[in-house]
Amino acid sequence: MRKTLILSFALLALVCTARAQDASTDSLLFTIKPLGNNVFAAIAKPKSAAGSNAGFVIGGDGVAVIDTFQDAAAARQLLGEIQKLTKLPIKFVVNTHYHLDHVTGNAVFAQAGAVIIAHKNVRTWIHTENLKFFGAGIKPEQKAWIDGLFAPNVVYDSALELFLGPRRVVVRFFPGHTGGDSVVSVPDANVYFCGDLFWRKTLPNLIDGTTDKWADSDAKLAAEGPKAAFVSGHGDVGTAEDVLEFGRYLGQLRAMVSGAIQNGLAGEALTSGVLPQLQEKYGSWDFFDHFAKRNIADTEKELRGEKKIPQPAAE
């Protein structure tokens, strides 16, 4: 009888522990996905405050984090999850670009001792270009949010190598999404963190985009890593074929809009004319209702030479 009671209490404790762990996981704003060899993606839960994907790499003497979410609370959760896996310090954070949904948690990791790294354009744009997302009627608290973002304190031009003990992490500039985008690759794990150069089965934000250069970047990445895992900025982890599929979206969008321009359409008439074609091919993708019309309008501006693209600050 006593042995039965002890066993029952032990089983009850295990169940309670499991439930507590499940509850803790449920409270996270993202899902941790192991990609092998101590490389992890942090995939934002739909409609959560995380806002975008992130990830991290554990090396021999430290950790590199890629992107820091749209919300500082999500960044603190990510720091906590990393610290459950390793006692090694967070050495580096790489911002894949300046958009606020990828950089808001920078200060969390800077306070933990990390160096914040990005393409050289990000250091200025993080405080200037992010303001446009709030429009002309930006509120004081919104401006304070952007002013308070922790800017990168190490920048690079075309490429940079980071070392976590013997482990090499490569950071490279690729054009297309903003003009200040980094792809972070981990050669010994065959993993690429693409930021918003890759959206898996998800319509993208084209506000800063140059779609032909962007599609070219995706083609190069897919060719370089045919068997790699590609961590998207939004959506799930993908394959090289997923990256190519996203590049095809950009190309087909350009072709549709270009054809409408040649047929004399413009503005709302052009958007209305292209939308059914886009919906037929990509209506099942995430964010279609949110971004489809904007994608068409942004691409029209791009093709007409009317689009305002962020410009590097004078040196």
Image (tube, helix red, strand yellow):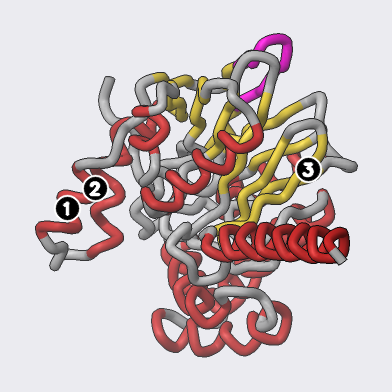
Quadrant of the image for the C terminus? top left
- Residue that badge 3 annotates: 35
- Identity, as a three-letter code, of the amino acid under mark 1: Lys
Q: Nearer the viewer, mark 3 or mark 2?
A: 3
Q: Which residues are magenta?
A: 161-171
- Residue that badge 1 annotates: 143
Q: Residues within 10 Å of mark 1 (few under 14, many from 20)?
A: some
- Residue that badge 2 annotates: 146
Q: Are marks 1 and 3 in contact (CB under 8 Å)?
A: no
- Please tell me which residue lies in front, 285 or 106: 106
Return the x and y of residue 258 as percentages of the image width and height: 58, 70
Q: Is the stretch drawn in magenta largely helix, strand or loop?
A: strand
Q: Nearer the viewer, mark 1 or mark 3?
A: 3
**Residue shown at 80% from the left, 59% from the top:** 6
**Residue shown at 66% from the left, 83% from the top:** 283
Q: Is residue 286 magenta?
A: no
Q: Is residue 307 above or below residue 75?
A: below
Return the x and y of residue 185 as percentages of the image width and height: 70, 31
Instruction: Quote the CA–CA distance across marks 1 and 3.
Output: 37 Å
Return the x and y of residue 36 as percentages of the image width and height: 82, 38
Residue extending farthest to the front is 1
Q: Residues within 10 Å of mark 3 (few under 14, many from 20)?
A: some
- Please tell me which residue lies in front, 158 or 251: 158
- Please tell me which residue lies in front, 81 or 203: 81
